[in-house]
Amino acid sequence: MSANQNDTNLLEVRGLTKIFGTLTACDHIDLDIARGEIHALLGENGAGKSTLVKMLFGSLEPNSGEIFWNGQAVRISSPGVAKKLGIGMVFQHFSLFEALTAAENIALSLDDGSPISSIAAKARALSFSYGLPLDPESLVGDLSVGERQRIEIIRCLLQTPQLIILDEPTSVLTPQEADKLFETLERLRSEGKSILYISHRLEEVKRICDRATVLRHGKVVGHCNPREETASSLARMMVGNEVQAVVRAPVEGIDKAQPLLEIRNLSRKPATPFSIPLKGINLNVRAGEVIGIAGVAGNGQGEFFESVSGEVLQQDAASVRIRGKDAGGLTITGRRLLGAAFVPEERLGHGAAPRMKLSENLLLSRHATDGKAFVGAGGMVKSAAIYAAAQRIIEAMDVRKSVPDPEAAALSGGNLQKFIVGRELDRRPSVMVVNQPTWGVDAGAAAHIRQALIELSRSGSAVLVISQDLDELFEISDAIAVMHNGELSKPMPIAEATFEKVGLLMGGAEPGHAEHRLETA
Amino acid sequence: MDITVNILLTIATAATPLLIAAIGELVVERSGVLNLGVEGMMIMGAVGGFGASYLTGSPWIGLLAAIAMGAVFSLLFAVMTLSLATNQVATGLSLTLLGLGLSGMMGTRFVGQPGERLPNLDIPGLTSIPVIGRLLFGQDPIFYISIALTAAVMWFLFKTRTGLTLRSIGDSHTSAHALGIHVIRYRYLAVIFGGACAGLAGGHLSLVYTPQWVENMSAGRGWIALALVVFASWRPWRVLAGAYIFGAVWIGQLHAQAFGIPVPSQFLSSLPYLATVVVLVLISRNKRLTMMNTPASLGQPFVPDR
């Protein structure tokens, strides 16, 4: 049996097919995962990656096809069956319980009856050994996306599975956190565990993955060794044609341009015992520039975005000024009417109402600013005009969908993000504030969104981008500021910024002592 | 002194059915299911309990029959909302209407018949202790069940793994499903437990409170129990406090009316509702605790994505 186990692959998938209505999400997929390998699953949004892994984890049932585990045909009818076989999963759309603590969330996915107190201690120890610090007592509802992902990863590791499926695990981690995760993955590989790794970040796929399977439109279009490929050749396999590199023309005389968004000494007390206070933030975003805000998840970026967008009002009306007018006391709609547009971090439930159609979501965010176009006499909604505008955005942003006007929740994460960003860009706002513009979005779509943000700034708007993706910030920003523990550093012009400098600020180093710290470290 | 003890005893008797029904509904709602049929299940328990007691001559069999009646009746709700994913609000309301009508029909031959009351506890030596003897050791058996039930539900929800799983389903059934938890199975059990509790509360009405059968004898207590659960922000000890505040003010206003206090009786009758709401709102000012305790998926039908 043991000899046999070494010969066969850990997991083999033959002809797996899943059909939703008229859409074939997965079309006769074949996949082999050997013992002790990190296998990458590549593909654009809507290529069928998530559908495939959901079938492997038992959340979805295939229409046809077979799955072999250790050479035995198995039917994975539920996640419980998958867990019993030894398959663990870290979800892209988190499967956490917001009203429960981190420790309780972890306890729920463990089968043994160990008391919650011992799980908390185990989780704390494991999280520190993997460099993913975690407070087991904290309430998930209070945590940032990055911190929630840590819980998901720790939860999966505590189950000691044979195969770990990671759906975009690094999209919310800092470079340092991602490095620690890669060390963890390599350690797991050396222990003989297998990993199925889904990511849009081709550089990291090249760095840690042994083999890759590429999906396009629900079909396997190729297998390769990512180490022998370049990022652009991988992207070409995924997309089917060349991915346009993002172009950022330098801007001249930006110092003289008028600031469209001014943040003056913005402070905020923590809203909950676990959230971060904002401490005297100052920032000007001028017409024609993109300012990026970097930072480790949970350092006040969410609180800052809420304050700027008007989800939370300020006591001091002058602490947020949009196009020269005090906006601190205005609501989101008031700020939108001044010409600002906002894209929040959470797509479902925050950026879009999940159970409403895209056209309805368009009306929800733009009924005030585009009142004349969308709402007629007596408050009657002009459905045809809204539908046409939604279709215009869908076309401009290349949103892939199965019906003409789907519910927001029916789109894959990246496609919904393209729609939400497109919905705001379509207004040509003079101030655009985006939190995590391309989280979980594939290379082609991310390049599209980034280019669109740069072009918006070059046409005379002020663009503020909050992101945990440093590559992205270096690609699109004219200056980068770093948020740490509720404080914002002075923006650093892109010509002077390096990964090391920004990384140190993210870790909490004083700007002036950055070099010194490097030497001692 | 005797009057005080008597008043306290009547308060406990008034509060007990509310407490039992509300504790049952609390478990149901913690699992994410909103069953508005408490009133219907309660009245079915009342008629079932009285009927069995009348036919067999044993109020103890009546007690078991009341529990069974509530549980079976709630199963109807469970099949509709959980297996067939019907709207929980509409199904719950129709359960109440069905229960009121059906119990009236089943109970026609019991109207005006004398019933037997469940005997009070009587422990020689203890029950005869002045004042506290009767309060602690001389009440009806369902009173003790209601207190034990509250403690047990508290322990179950917050100290056991199964309780944690139940709360997690109430918070997010999709996440629970993704973890491999049998959402529907847990909800079935929770709904049936809630039904059994409502049945027991009904049994208290027809076997202890007024040992006879009167049509519509639940008189809106099921609705009060539902409201208690929400105002108590889904926390068992607050349900207990709410039920007893309601019972105390209700008994108090009855005495006030009897003394002929020059206040409109309609106002006095509304006092228990007012007092309960005010007190429970005051103790649930902590938004964070409320957020932690409100089942986020309450009332949403769950259809696993296959």
Image (cartoon, coloured by chain):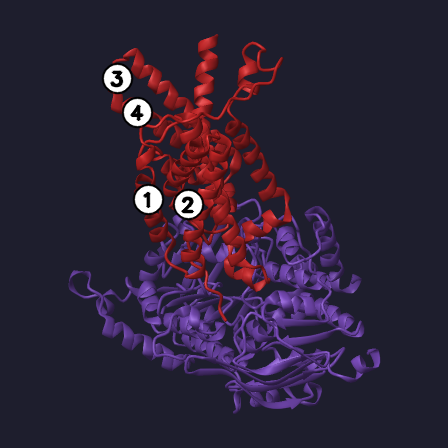
Chain colours: A purple, B red
Residue B75, horizontal then vertical, whole percent: 45, 51
Crowd around label 4: few <14 · some 14–19 · many ≥20 (10 Å): some
Chain at numbered mark 2:
A
The reply to whether residue A123 is in sight is: yes
Amino acid type, residue under disc 1 in the picture: Leu
In this rendering, position of residue A333 left or right of residue A118: left
Q: CA distance from mark 3 to mark 1?
A: 38 Å
Which mark's residue is nearer the viewer, 2 or 3? 3
Amino acid type, residue under disc 2 in the picture: Gln
Chain at numbered mark 3:
B
Amino acid type, residue under disc 4 in the picture: Ser
- Please tell me in which quadrant of the rendered image residue A220 appears: bottom right
| Number of the label disc, if any, that sits on residue B269 | 4
The reply to whether residue B216 is in sight is: no
| Number of the label disc, if any, that sits on residue B263 | 3
Residues indicated by labels 2 and 4 sit on the same polypeptide chain: no
Residue at 53 percent of width and 56 percent of height: B185
Disc 2 marks which residue? A315
Amino acid type, residue under disc 3 in the picture: Val
- Farthest right residue in view: A3
Q: CA distance from mark 2 to mark 3?
A: 47 Å
Disc 1 marks which residue? B102
Which mark's residue is nearer the viewer, 3 or 1? 1
Q: CA distance from mark 2 to mark 4?
A: 45 Å
- Farthest top residue in view: B1
| Number of the label disc, if any, that sits on residue A134 | none
